[in-house]
Amino acid sequence: MNFDCLFPIPVWSVDLDIDNEYLLNYIYELKDSSPGRIISNIRGWQSNNHYEDDFKELSSEVIKYGNKCLDDYGIDSDQMKLKCDNFWANVNTKGSKNKIHDHPKSFVSGVYYVRVSEGSGNIVFHSHANNQFRSFIKFNGIKTTRNTPLNVNRVEYSPKTGRLILFPSYLFHHVKPNTDDEDRVSISFNTLLSKI
């Protein structure tokens, strides 16, 4: 029997070699000078929006790997250009987490892990299509024998210092609580497409 897996949702990841010590110091300076904001964060601290010039080295890497995303989507980079829209820093103290959300009006979003430890909280991606399936089988008392890409409705990624994760901005996600005493420090961002 032929098996077609239709409509995949991509998540990309790559380990970067950039100056995390500089980023860490810069983020704590921001935190000391601003009360931040509350968007999806529960406890913890989130900076206001920042732009490419504030995170030059990281924004260069985001554009570089974001262009690979364009290629994977089959978008002609001679006609469309990827640009960074905004960045914000996150400091999740012990017990901090982020509620489920997406990033509307953006193309690809992502997170870069400046400093994380073992229990600092996984990022969890959610599938709407598989949520419907999970609801159906639960309602009908059906049990699955194993997890497969066709029946799971969430996938977790463990953070790693220096790792960049990119994902479609429409993909719902949340961050589990930091259970470690060390702060989980990351930078999140959105990108946009513009015509050349």
Image (cartoon, rainbow, N blue to C red):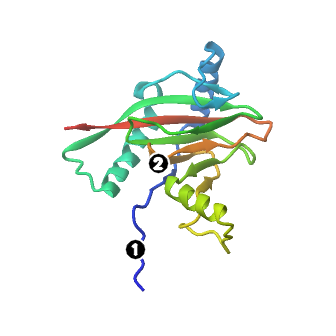
The residue that label 1 is drawn on is 4
Q: Amino acid at mark 2?
A: Phe
The image shows residue 22 at horizontal and vertical percentages of 58, 30
SS for callout 1: loop
The relative height of residue 112 versus residue 76 in the rendered view (above or below) is above
Image quadrant in which you'd find residue 182: top right
Q: Residue at x 59, y 20 (%)?
A: 37
Crowding at dot 1, Cα within 10 Å, few <14 / some 14-19 / many 20+, comes out as few
171 vs 176, left or right, is left
Mark sitting earlier along the chain (1/2): 1
Q: Amino acid at mark 1?
A: Asp
185 vs 171, left or right, is right
State which mark lies toward you, 1 or 2: 1
The image shows residue 23 at horizontal and vertical percentages of 57, 31
Residue 167 — which label? 2
Q: Residue at x 62, y 54 (%)?
A: 156
The C terminus, quarter of image = top left
Q: Residue at x 45, y 57 (%)?
A: 9
The N terminus, quarter of image = bottom left
The relative height of residue 82 versus residue 40 in the rendered view (above or below) is below
